[in-house]
């Protein structure tokens, strides 16, 4: 049950990261001016100069019941939300922690798209959603595939984020179970079996994403 929950949660983190990062990557690549694009990129990169543990602890303070997020919600009349106790905080912290691994691959592929194709589709009367569905998304498939693979593998193998954010108030993730087998119960055989199972699922996920997006390994390596 813990293994299935971890895999499903990692898939959810990947989907949320894509929904958040795709508009951002497209904006930087095709809509923003060079100066504005540079500012957005700096805003994404600079926080990563801080250690990951410090960023996770920062989210712990922000999402705490008496934290900054609930304080701001209280200003507009919203009752405090138990972000940490409900498990929502794990998703928020993970999406933030691995956002660059989704943004940059998509940005790199969208940037190579010839803007004249978008302009031609717009001149022919295509709505925005159809331009993205028929032109931008098919072109960005390799970048989306890379972003999904990296985000999923980092989320599935994450230990510090669920360990710190949940504070033991939520069921453990599979990575925490692996840690316990190695360092708490000293059951290295079972810990190794659990680790191999997680590795196998990550490999299967890579091939599943490649098949779904119709991309080959050499396209992912670019």
Image (cartoon, rainbow, N blue to C red):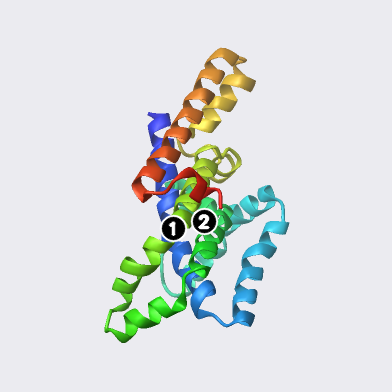
Q: Quadrant of residue 120?
A: bottom left
Q: Residue at x 53, y 25 (%)?
A: 195
Circle 2 packing at 10 Å, graded few (<14), some (14-19), many (20+), is: many
Residue 23 vertical placement versus 185 (above, below): below
Q: Quadrant of residue 135?
A: bottom left
User: Under tag 2, what secondary structure?
Assistant: helix
Report, in whole angstroms, how far the alpha carbon at label 1 lies from the one at label 2: 7 Å
**Residue 102 marker:** 2
Q: Earlier in the sequence, mark 1 or mark 2?
A: 1
Q: Quadrant of residue 211?
A: top left
Residue 148 vertical placement versus 132 (above, below): above
**Residue that mark 1 sits on:** 18
Residue 207 vertical placement versus 66 (above, below): above
Q: Where residue 168 sits in the image (x, y, percent)?
A: 53, 37
Q: Residue furthest bottom?
A: 123
* Side of 42 relative to 172 (left or right): right
User: Under tag 1, what secondary structure?
Assistant: helix
Q: Where residue 28 sits in the image (x, y, percent)?
A: 54, 73
Q: Is residue 81 visible?
A: no
The residue lying toward the viewer, choosing from 106 and 13, is 106
Q: Residue at x 55, y 57 (%)?
A: 96
Q: Where residue 189 sits in the image (x, y, percent)?
A: 56, 13
Query: From the image, which quarter does the N terminus lie in?
Result: top left
The residue lying toward the viewer, choosing from 43 and 126, is 126
Discs 1, 2 touching: Cβ within 8 Å? yes
* Side of 81 relative to 212 (left or right): right
Q: Residue at x 55, y 43 (%)?
A: 154
Q: Where residue 91 sits in the image (x, y, percent)?
A: 47, 51
The residue lying toward the viewer, choosing from 114 and 68, is 114
Circle 1 packing at 10 Å, graded few (<14), some (14-19), many (20+), is: many
């Amino acid at each position: 049950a813990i293994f299935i929950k971890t895999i499903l949660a990692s898939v959810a983190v990947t989907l949320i990261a894509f929904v958040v990062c795709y508009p951002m990557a497209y904006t930087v690549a095709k809509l923003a001016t060079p100066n504005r694009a540079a500012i957005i990129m700096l805003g994404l990169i600079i926080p990563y100069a801080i250690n990951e543990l410090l960023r996770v602890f920062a989210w712990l303070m922000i999402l705490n019941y008496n934290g900054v997020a609930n304080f701001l919600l209280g200003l507009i009349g919203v009752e405090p939300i138990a972000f940490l106790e409900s498990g929502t905080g794990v998703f928020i912290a993970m999406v933030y922690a691995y956002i660059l691994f989704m943004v940059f691959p998509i940005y790199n592929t969208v940037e190579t798209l010839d803007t004249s194709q978008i302009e031609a589709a717009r001149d022919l009367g295509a709505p925005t959603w159809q331009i993205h569905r028929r032109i931008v998304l098919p072109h960005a498939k390799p970048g989306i595939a890379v972003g999904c693979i990296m985000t999923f593998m980092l989320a599935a193998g994450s230990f510090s984020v669920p360990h710190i954010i949940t504070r033991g108030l939520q069921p453990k993730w599979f990575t925490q179970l692996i840690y316990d087998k190695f360092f708490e119960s000293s059951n290295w055989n079972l810990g190794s079996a659990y680790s191999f199972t997680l590795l196998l699922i990550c490999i299967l996920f890579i091939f599943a994403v490649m098949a779904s997006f119709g991309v080959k390994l050499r396209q992912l390596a670019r």
